[in-house]
Image (cartoon, grey):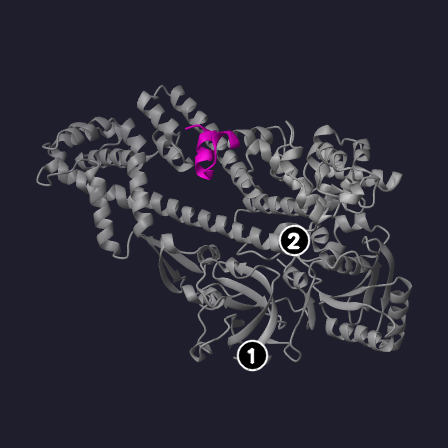
Amino acid sequence: MDVIDRIAKELSVHHKQVSAAVLLLDEGATVPFIARYRKEITGGLDDTQLRMLEERLAYLRELNERRKSILDSIQAQDKLTPELELAINAAETKTLLEDLYLPYKPKRRTKAQIAREAGLEPLADALLEDRSLIPEHIAAHYIDSDKGVADSAAALDGARQIIMERLSEQAELLAELRERVWQKGVIHATLVSGKEQQAEKFKDYFDYSEAINKIPSHRALALFRGRNENLLALDLKPAADDKDEHDRLAQFVAQHLNVSDLSRPADAWLAETARFAWKIKLYTRIDLDLKQRLREAAEQEAIRVFSSNLRDLLLAAPAGAKATMGLDPGIRTGVKVAIVDTTGKVLATDTIYPHPPRKQWDESIATLAALIQRYQVNLVSIGNGTGSRETDQLVADVMKRHSELRFSKVIVSEAGASVYSASELAAKEFPELDVSLRGAVSIARRLQDPLAELVKIDPKAIGVGQYQHDVNQVQLARGLDTVVEDCVNAVGVDVNTASVSLLKRVSGLSSGVSENIVAYRNEHGSFANRKQLKKVPRLGDKAYEQAAGFLRIMNGDNPLDASAVHPEAYPVVEAIIVDTGKSIRDIIGQSQFLRRLEPSKYTNEHFGLPTVTDILQELEKPGRDPRPEFKSVEFKAGIEKITDLEPGMTLAGVVTNVANFGAFVDIGVHQDGLVHISHLSDTFIKDPREAVKTGDMVNVKVLEVDVARKRISLSMKTSVDKADFGTAKSPDKREARPAHKAKQAEKPVSGAFANAFAKALKK
C-alpha cells in the first residue's frame, strides 16, 4: 500500500482527496489556505483532517527514507533475500522496520561475535539441529585455548550467546512478546531510598502499580518526571503475577526454538538458553521499548491537550478596538501608566506614586483622570501583580470622584509582561520607551486583543499544558506552532495595524516578508487595497496567493478587502452584482437578500459550490471574528487566599487549564482548584472538554481544602451529596498543581482571557 492509499484509509477519505492535498502541500500551500480556499480540489477536507494528513505524510515519508537506507545497507552486505525484502517493504511502522534490521545492523563487538570468531557458531547450529546430542560431549570438540575457549563450559557459553543474540533479533518474536507484555504488563513505582523528603510531591507514587496500557498521560509523565529526578524507581512487570509470567514467557521463547522434549539433552540445554535469552536480552529490550511507547503516547496526548488549551486561550474574547489605559502596579517603584489608541498605538506614558512610601494618592487620581479625559479612554487594564488590589482601589476612586468619565476597569494578568519588556522584540518595537513602561503597554494591549499579544511569546512559555517541559520539545514546538498559525488565520489580520509577530503567522508570510510589509506601511502609509501588497519587496505571487485572503484592509477602496473572500474569487461577487443589479455596498450584510440567492447559479469551472457558498456566507458578515464576546468575572469579596475557603462555598471562577482528569479553575486565591472529571457535569462525560474549555467562566462549589498540600477540590454539579464534602475524589494521583507565583496579588475582577493567561512565561 503506497503512502497516498494508506493515508486515505486512515482518514477514511478518497484517494483523490489525499492525492490532491499532498500535491498542494508539496507546492508550498499551507493548511489554512487549502482548508479555506481549495475545498473543491480536496473534496472539502477540513483543517483537522489536513493537519493529520500533513503529520502522517511526514511520518510515512521518513519511514520510506529509512526503509530505502536499510535495504541499501543489507544489499551492500549481500544478505538481502527476496523474503527479507518483502518483509521490509511491508513494514508499516518504524519499530517493525528496526526489528527487521537488527540482525544486519552494524554493532559493537558483542559476546556473540566473539564466540563466532572463536569458531563456535557450528556448535550452536549442531545443538539446534540434533536434540539428541549431549551438549558437554559435542562442546569438547570446540575447545581451543588459542581462541579463548578453555573448556566445554566456555564453548557452550559461547554457543549460548550466539543463540541468545539470534533470538533477540527475531522481529516476529519481538513483536509478539512486546504486544503480550503491553496487554498484561504492570508498571510499579517505588520511592528511591532516602528520598522521602525531596519526593513529597510524588507521595502518591511511593508504592504504586498500574497496568501499563491503562496509565493516563498525565500520570505517566508524572512517573517519568519522578524517575528523571531520581526520586522514583520504575519497574515493568510482565504481569501482576510477576514470577509466573516470567516463566510463561521464557517457555514461549523456548517454543521458538522448537523445544518439545526436555528429556533430550540438547532440548534441556536450549530451554535454559531460552530462559537466559528472555531475562537478559529480550526482557531488557522490551522493558525499554514499552516504557518508551508509554512515554511517547503520553507525550502525544499531552501535546494534544496543550494544543487544545492554547487554541482556547488564543481565541479568547478580545475587548476590542477601544482606547485603553494599561497600569503596571508597583508599590515602592510606582505604578507605570501607558495609553494606547484603538489600534494599540502608544499615545502617552507616565509613572505615578500613589502607594507608600510617597503616598501621592490625590495627585495620582488627578493624573489618571486627566489622561483618561484627554485620550477618551474606554477601558483601564490593571495588571494583577504586587500592588494590584491597591491600584484597583485607586482606579475605583477615580471613578467615584470623576463620575463624568465613562470607562470600565478590568484586572488582567501581567504574567510575562516584565520578561517581554526586556526582550529583543520589545526593544525593537518600543526603542524609545523605558523597559518598565513597556510592560504597561503590553498590559493594555493584551486586554484589547489577546491573540495579537500572545503571538509575541513563545507558545511553550504559556503554561496551559500537562507537563509541557517533560515532552519532546521539537514535537511540542511543531504542534503549538500549527495551533498559532490556525488561530491567526481563523481570525484574520488587519494588515494596517498588525505587528511583525502577528503577520509572520499568516499563511504564506515569512518573518522577512512580514518585516517588509511593516516597513512599506511605515514609509507609504496604510494599504488602501490588497493589490498594493504586491508592491511589497519579496512578496511574490505565491505568497500573495497564500496570504491575501487572511489579510484584511478595513475602510479601504474595496469592501471585499475587509472580508475573507479571496481576491481570486472577486469575479464571483462581480457576477452576483451584475446579475442582481446591486452595488457591492448594497449587498454586504444583507442576510435575507443573500440567503435568497441560489449558489449554484454562480459556479463555474474555477469556483464550485463550496466556494460560492462560503462567499455568500462571508458577505453576510464580512471579516466576522470567530472569537466570543468579551466578558469579565467578579471574584467573591473577602475570599483572597486558600485559608479563606470553606467546604460548601459557591464561587465564580475561570477555567485556566483542562486536563484529561478534570479542569483547573482560578477562584481568586492564587491557587487553582481542581474540578475532577466526575464533578464537571451531572451526566457522565469521557472528556472534560465536553463540559468546559480554557477561559470559560464557571460557578463552582468548594468540596475540600488541603492547605498543607495546596489542593482545592471543586464541583460544578448542580447538586452535591453531603458525602462529597471533605472526602473529595483524589485528583487522579496527579502531581500537585504548582501554586501561583507570589507576585500575583488579589484579583477582584478578571477577564476570562486574563486568568488563563496568568500562566504565561512562568515556566
Marks 1 and 2, the one that precedes in the sequence: 2
Identify residue for label 2.
314
Alpha-carbon distance for marks 1 and 2? 31 Å
Disc 1 residue type? Met
Start-end of magenta stretch: 1-17
Identify residue for label 1.
649
Q: Quadrant of the C terminus?
A: bottom right
At label 2, counting other C-alpha atoms closer than 10 Å, the crowd grade (few under 14, some 14-19, many 20 or more) is many
- Closer to the camera in the image, 300 or 719: 719
| Occupied quadrant, residue 26 | top right
Is residue 12 visible to the viewer in this orientation of the structure?
Answer: yes
Q: State whether residue 272 is above or below residue 231.
A: above
At label 1, counting other C-alpha atoms closer than 10 Å, the crowd grade (few under 14, some 14-19, many 20 or more) is few
Give left or right: position of 327 versus 642: right
- Closer to the camera in the image, 553 or 56: 553
Residue under the image location 11 percent in, 41 percent down = 262
